[in-house]
Image (spheres, rainbow, N blue to C red):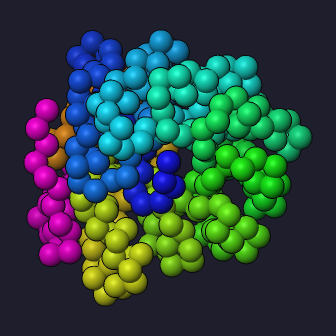
Amino acid sequence: MNWNGVLPALTTAFDQNHQLDLTFTSRHASWLVENGCNGVIALGSLGEAAAQTPAEKRALLAALVAAFAGKAPVVAAISALSTAEAVELARMAAGEGCSGLMILPPYVYLGDWRETRAHVAAILQATELTSILYNNPVAYGTDFLPTQIADLAAEFPQLAAVKESSTDVRRVTAIRALLGERIRCFVGVDDAIVEGIQVGATGWVAGLVNAFPRESVELFRLASEAKMEECFALYRWFLPLLRLDTVRKFIQLIKQVQQEVGIGAARVRAPRLELVGQELAEVQQIVAHAQQTRPPQAIASTPFIC
């Protein structure tokens, strides 16, 4: 597992009966890699993991691993109500051939550091897979502080990276100040990627990449190579889309963007519902404007064929 570059937080496709569409999801994941992504992260927040059964999660991971056939890594997000469930999911992901884990804090219960550390430690010890820690205090209420990340890294060599979604790029600086190159820092909110790279992030767990992979990879490259004039021209164009990743209905919004550009359907599972009315009109307007004003730096993704 090579923790760098652009790793999509993969959306999960559903058919007209709201059952898993494994054929589409597998082709979608392969298309993302064909356009320069370094692999995929499945069953994360954007992947609607909370709305899937354990059997569905197993089937999805198995389908993705089979689709890649060793050509790219599949990372399984580990999120659960209980530590026992999280450990079982981690072992299942390893058994299905995943290359890494993304560890989330427990759903619902906001424990203190002793409790949260024990939860993360149990997942890290459950397999030999290398892992990335997901820090998203905005969404989950649990904040992995830089000193706490350093504490975990000192005991668990398999902890290789952190997805920093606090929306504060100073966290990247703080983590690097404590750990240097020991931990790879990934930006986890789309509209902070350029700033995050400027302070030392080497990876991006991305959302809008599901619809715009080549454009996302190019933005990451330009920022990493400090080609700032070209980078900011592309960033300014991309920002209205990237900001859709940072609001409550980001799943519905990103799936709607995919539908608007012909990469799948906007279907989500209840309790989420598809966008209607003004919300729908606004995202359609954002996509239409982006398509009409594409700058030369926005290298288009290859056509999607399922």
Image location of residue 16, percent across then percent down: 23, 17
Q: Report how many numbered discs are placed on residues in the image.
A: 0
The answer to which image quadrant residue 10 occupies is top left
Foreground residue, 38 or 276?
Answer: 38
Assess whether residue 305 is covered by the magenta stretch. yes
- Asked whether residue 127 appears in the rendered view, the answer is yes
Instruction: State whether residue 232 appears in this view.
Output: no
* Residue at x 77% of width, y 37% of height: 121
Instruction: Judge from the rendering whether residue 268 lies leftward or rightward of residue 143; answer left or right.
Output: left
Quadrant of image for the C terminus: top left
Determine the residue located farthest toward the bottom in the rendered image. Answer: 229
- Residue 178 percent coordinates (x, y): 76, 70
Q: Position of residue 69 (x, y in %)?
A: 32, 33
Magenta segment, which residues?
278-306
- In this picture, residue 45 sits left or right of residue 153: left
Q: Residue at x 73, y 74 (%)?
A: 177
Check the image and report above or below for 132 versus 192.
Answer: above
The percent position of residue 189, horizontal first and vertical second, equals 49, 57
Residue 204: in magenta span: no
Q: Residue at x 60, y 44 (%)?
A: 130
Q: Note whether 213 is above or below 265 in the view shown.
A: below
Q: Given the current orientation, which residue lies at the most extreme right position?
A: 114
Compare residues 190 and 89 and report the one nearer the observer. Answer: 89
Q: Nearer the viewer, residue 106 or 126?
A: 126
